[in-house]
Amino acid sequence: MKPTSEFPAVIEAKKIVQEHIRYYNDMMKDESHLPVEKQSLVYRLRKRAEIRRQIPGRKSVEEGARDRIADLLEEAAREIERLHRIIADDWK
């Protein structure tokens, strides 16, 4: 009998976990020490979304509602990362 580490489901699960780890690590890269012109677009989009969600006077913050612009900023960052991964995979 094969070891469980060779089961297709386990192999696929490991791939998913590795992808999530890569995504988390990319998301958590702190570029705040860099000048703005050296920061990546993805970092700046996420940072702007984070800032918008923390502004005390914003109606969405006061009401605990979703900030649709911040959501779009994060969606754009995710899409850029997805496209970067596709391009990187094509070059492998």
Image (cartoon, helix red, strand yellow):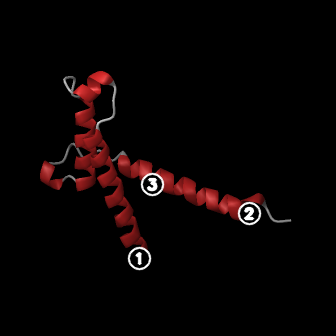
Quadrant assignment, res 40? bottom left
Foreground pick, 61 / 86: 61
N-terminal-most mark, 3 or 2: 2
Question: Which mark is first along the chain, 1 or 3?
Answer: 3
Say what amino acid the circle numbered 3 marks. Answer: Arg
Give coordinates of residue 49: x percent, y percent.
Answer: 26, 41
Residue located at (36% from left, 48% from top): 27
Could you tell me how far apart the alpha carbons at marks 2 and 1 are, in whole angstroms?
27 Å
With respect to residue 81, does 21 lie above or below? above
Q: Are marks 3 and 1 in contact (CB under 8 Å)?
A: no
Sequence-first disc among 2 and 1:
2
Q: Which residue is mark 3?
A: 22
- The residue that disc 1 covers is 90
Tag 2 residue: 7
Spatial distance from mark 3 to mark 1, Cα to Cα?
A: 17 Å
Residue at 43%, 53% in the rendered image: 23
Query: Whole-percent x and y of residue 44?
Result: 22, 48
Return the x and y of residue 14 as percentages of the image width and height: 61, 57
* Amino acid type of the residue that numbered disc 2 sits on in the rendered structure: Phe
The quadrant of the rendering that contains the N terminus is bottom right
Q: How crowded is the residue under tag 1: few (<14 C-alpha within 10 Å), some, or many (20+)?
A: few
Question: Tag 3: Cα neighbours inside 10 Å, few (<14), some, or many (≥20)?
Answer: few
